[in-house]
Every structure is written in structure tokens, then in C-alpha cells.
Image (cartoon, rainbow, N blue to C red):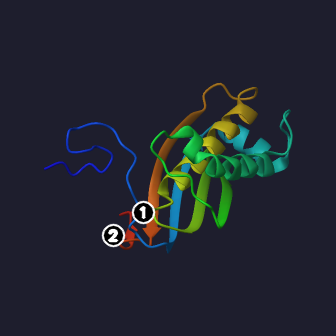
Amino acid sequence: MNDLSHLDPEGRVRMVDVSAKGATARVAVAEGFLVAAPDTIRRIETGGLPKGDFRPTVQLAGIQAAKRTADLIPLCHPLPLDHVAIEVETDSAAGRVRVVATTTVTARTGVEMEALTAVSVALLTAWDLLKAVDRGLRIEGVRLLEKRGGRTGDWRAENP
């Protein structure tokens, strides 16, 4: 018995057929971190970066990425997103930027991949904006924090 939904009974890759499922409201929340030198984080907070305004650029990149998820992940269904929110928080003491993406949709399948893609591309954009001032950047901790809706119901990560 194969419990991987993206494989058919013969083990071949397939797009999951969701045509028999009803559309329901779904929400996913994901997070990730960009670790940087404390001075780099302070430069974000004071607006002293050579490539421009950090937060709006990172937010727009995350929103655009969520909208293009099905173009990037081969077996992902294209979804008519209802909303995408990207939060960008800095912590100079910890030396990191936290990005949180919340995606919502009314559809036949979940919106987790959109939230994870939004966080990932937002963090890559942050890296691009900061690489001229900090060569030791590191992305870590990209994960799903919660999902709501759908056949399997609600789920929340331990230690969010």
C-alpha cells in the first residue's frame, strides 16, 4: 500500500486528482530565519543598506513567490489565493531576520506550499539585499507552523 499521494499504484509520479473534493477555506502559516551579523540587522533597522528599502522589497518578493508556487513546484496545483501576508521582523540581539508568511485560499487542496515558497523566496531576497554588507549570511528554520482546513483538519507545529 502506497501512502504517498503523488505516486500512482505503479509508483509513477502524478498530480493528485482533487476533482472529487469540495472547496473549503484553508490557511497556512510558515516561518524562516536569515541569520546575519548584529551590525547587519541594525543597518536594516536604520535603513542604511545600499540596495534600498529592505522590508517592502522582502514582503513583495514573498507575495509574488506565493502567487507563482505552481510554476516552481512541478506537482503543485495552481491556487486562486485569497490573501498573502508577509511579516518581516528583525532582532539585532539575536542577529537574525524572521519572515512569517500567512496564505489563505478557498480551494480543493491546501495552501502550505504557497506559504513555504513565500518564506523561502522572501529570505533569498533578503540575502540578495544584504550580501554586499555581510558575507556570512545563513538561512535556517524554514518550516510550516500551522495549517487550517481541509479533510485532514487543523495542525500546529510543536514549539512554534
Q: Is residue 66 above or below residue 85?
A: above
Give how far across and how far down residue 74 sits, in percent: 48, 39
Q: How far apart are marks 2 and 1 (CA)?
A: 17 Å
Residue at the farthest front position = 19
Q: Where is residue 127 in the image (x, y as percent from the top left)?
A: 67, 35
Identify the residue shown where x is 52% and y is 62%.
29
Task: Looking at the picture, tell me which residue is in the foreground, 118 or 149.
Answer: 149
Which residue occupies 56% across, 52% down?
78
**Which residue matches tag 1?**
19
Residue 91 appears anywhere in the view: no
Q: Nearer the viewer, residue 4 or 20?
A: 20
The answer to whether 120 appears left or right of 11 in the picture is right
Is 54 left or right of 151, judged from the image as shown? Answer: right
Helix, strand or loop at label 2? It is loop
Please identify the quadrant where the C terminus is shown.
bottom left
Tell me what residue is drawn at x 65 percent, y 46 percent: 65
Element class at badge 1: loop
Q: Nearer the viewer's eye, disc 2 or disc 1?
A: 1
Q: Position of residue 119 (x, y in %)?
A: 58, 49
**Where in the figure is residue 146, as x and y percent of width and height?**
45, 65
Say few, some or many: other residues with alpha carbon within 10 Å of mark 2 (under 14 / 14 to 19 / 20 or more): few
Query: Which label number is shown at residue 152?
Result: 2
* Lower sequence index among marks 2 and 1: 1
In-front residue for pair 133/94? 133
Residue type at mark 1? Answer: Ser
Give above or below for 57 relative to 82. Answer: above
Left or right of residue 11: residue 117: right
Left or right: residue 23 versus residue 90 is left
Residue 158 quadrant: bottom left
Q: Which residue lies furthest to the left in this view?
A: 1
Q: Residue 47 carries which label?
A: none
